[in-house]
């Protein structure tokens, strides 16, 4: 079966760095996505990785290792507005997104 | 660019009635759109894949006669929840895939459905 695992909840301090991990097992791979979702709102796109390595975009970076079925989202200089759920999703061989359950990130002052 | 709208944003209906939710891609064409449902504190669940000009593909466990999908044009897909029941109360989100790129999906803002 297809499976995506990520921690349920994480807590971090404002101004710090946090890494959210995601491991996956899917039928085929056409890229891995990270989305941010605030409560009561739809997800918004953060990053897309299809090749191994690190993609940096401002305070957010995303890493992918296809051989290990592993990705992480790195958030730097945390701000209170970063409190949200972070969803890892893998696009399978049929170009369908397989979603993780999401990681709720709580930022404390 | 790449904006997807949904209407209505919130709807309250009585049990047994039907509700239609519209999903529009405002500045791009989307042959393929997706309908998701999300219950509180849970992740997105794909309900169906909507393709313009053909029947929608439903995920296992989703009743196609209850959740009617019509992809009438390259910019509009509708989801009709027929004979709604309180257990259908959820957050319904659509996404649209631009025709030019396979891996992109843009999400609408979601529709909060409450069935009383």
Image (spheres, grey):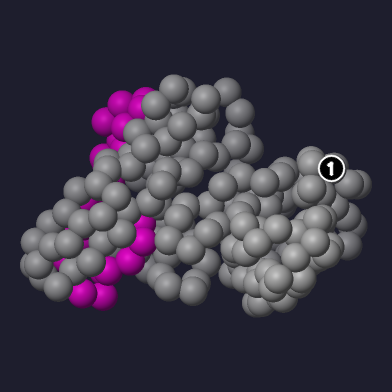
Residue at screen point 48% across, 63% down: A39
Which chain letter matches label 1? A
The answer to which of B4 and A94 lies nearer the viewer is B4
Residue B60 % position (x, y): 42, 64
Residue at screen point 72% across, 50% down: A32
The answer to which of B43 and B57 lies nearer the viewer is B43
What is the quadrant of residue B63 in the picture? bottom left
Residue B47 % position (x, y): 40, 57
Task: Report whether A107 appears left or right of A74.
Answer: left
Task: Report whether A88 appears left or right of B55.
Answer: right
Task: Report whether B76 appears left or right of B41.
Answer: left
Does any portion of residue B103 appear in the rendered image?
yes
Does any portion of residue B67 appear in the rendered image?
no
Residue at screen point 65% across, 77% down: A8
Residue A11 % position (x, y): 72, 76
The answer to which of A103 and A15 lies nearer the viewer is A15
Residue B69 magenta:
yes
Residue A64 % position (x, y): 84, 52
The quarter of the image holding the N terminus of chain A is: bottom right
User: Bounds of the magenta span?
Assistant: B65-92
Q: Is residue A56 above or below residue A97?
A: above
Residue at screen point 18% across, 69% down: B115
Q: Which structural element holds mark 1?
A: strand
Q: Which residue is mark 1?
A: A56
């Amino acid at each position: 079966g297809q499976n995506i695992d990520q921690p349920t909840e994480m807590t971090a301090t404002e101004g710090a760095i946090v890494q959210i991990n995601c491991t996956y097992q899917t039928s085929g791979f056409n890229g891995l996505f990270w989305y941010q979702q605030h409560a009561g709102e739809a997800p918004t796109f953060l990053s897309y990785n299809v090749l191994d390595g690190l993609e940096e975009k401002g305070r957010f970076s995303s890493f992918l290792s296809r051989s290990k079925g592993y990705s992480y989202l790195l958030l730097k200089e945390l701000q209170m507005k970063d409190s949200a759920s972070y969803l890892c999703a893998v696009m399978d061989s049929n170009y369908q997104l397989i979603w993780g359950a999401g990681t709720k990130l709580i930022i404390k002052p | 660019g790449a904006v997807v709208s949904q209407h209505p944003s919130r709807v309250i209906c009585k049990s047994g009635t039907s509700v239609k939710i519209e999903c529009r891609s405002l500045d791009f064409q989307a042959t393929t759109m997706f309908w998701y449902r999300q219950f509180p504190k849970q992740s997105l669940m794909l309900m169906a894949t909507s393709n313009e000009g053909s029947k929608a593909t439903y995920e296992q466990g989703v009743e196609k006669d209850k959740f009617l999908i019509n992809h009438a044009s390259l910019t509009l897909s509708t989801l009709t929840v027929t004979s709604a029941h309180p257990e259908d109360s959820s957050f319904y989100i659509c996404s649209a895939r631009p025709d030019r790129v396979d891996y992109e999906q843009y999400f609408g803002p979601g529709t909060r459905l409450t069935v009383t």
